[in-house]
Amino acid sequence: MKEDLGKRIQTLAEWLYESRHPVVFTGAGISTESGLPDFRGPDGMWTRRDKGLPPRPMSRPWDSVEPNSGHTAIADLQKLGKLAFLISQNVDNLHLKSGIHPDSLAELHGNITKLRCTTCGKKVDKTTGMTLCQCGGNLVRSVVDFGEPLPERDLMLSFEHSRKSDLFVVVGSSLAVTPAADMPAEALRSGAKLVIINQGETPFDRHAHLRFHEKIGDVLPSAIKRLKSLMGLFE
């Protein structure tokens, strides 16, 4: 199985190397290795809710949680010029903490550390203490509650880049929530290769060109190391 994993990691590295418009899509699963709960895992937030159980208490405050090797690997893709766009369902701010450029990131469900202008959609840090945007609009929490519409700009850019992608890599998402889960379908329709790195099953597993059930930290960092080698960059 380890030999098979090595072959699949090598294939992912080669596809990243060859890709002209690689897009990464992340869900809660990428942050579990930082100590945050996922949603649909065996002990996930929605799984516990469906069983009538309360969420597990956080062992430390959200703002003290740090990016893990999965987040860092995606930030490395950006540095290598191999990340056209990053779409995330997460609100934990760990992608921005890892160094991802805000212009290359769509946070579909908002960000726990940001406020959003109700008029122009601009986001500002909560720490500024601002209540009004420079445009005069009201600043409200940016996290999207269940049933609320997703931020228009982020949604538009996500679909646009999904359609442009030639390689679409899903990392830590069960792909169970729409409209976010529609994006892999858009990528497939445009002829992109689909890679899924997620320990649980997803509705897109039979459509995936490459599938990893292993931990993200056991896949992405190794794939980036091999990608660097293909690019002639040696550590």
Image (cartoon, rainbow, N blue to C red):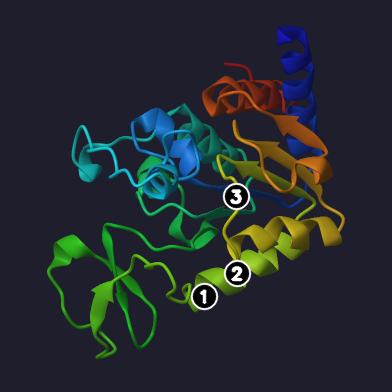
Give whichever of 206, 105 is nearer the camera. 206
As measured in the structure, the alpha-carbon distance from the residue carrying label 3 to the one carrying label 1 is 16 Å
* 1 and 2 marks in contact (CB < 8 Å): yes
- Can residue 81 be seen? no
Q: Residue at x 34, y 47 (%)?
A: 52
Dot 2 corresponds to which residue? 157
Classify 10 Å Cα crowding around label 1: few (below 14), some (14-19), many (20 and above): few
Classify 10 Å Cα crowding around label 3: few (below 14), some (14-19), many (20 and above): many
Q: Helix, strand, or loop for circle 3?
A: strand
* 3 and 1 marks in contact (CB < 8 Å): no
In the rendered structure, find residue 207 and report the number of the disc placed on it.
none
Q: Earlier in the sequence, mark 3 or mark 2?
A: 3
Residue 20 location, x and y as percent? 77, 49
As measured in the structure, the alpha-carbon distance from the residue carrying label 3 to the one carrying label 2 is 13 Å
Q: Helix, strand, or loop for circle 1?
A: helix
Q: Helix, strand, or loop for circle 2?
A: helix
Residue extending farthest to the left is 129
Q: Residue at x 46, y 48 (%)?
A: 100
Q: Residue at x 74, y 47 (%)?
A: 204
Dot 1 corresponds to which residue? 153
Classify 10 Å Cα crowding around label 2: few (below 14), some (14-19), many (20 and above): some
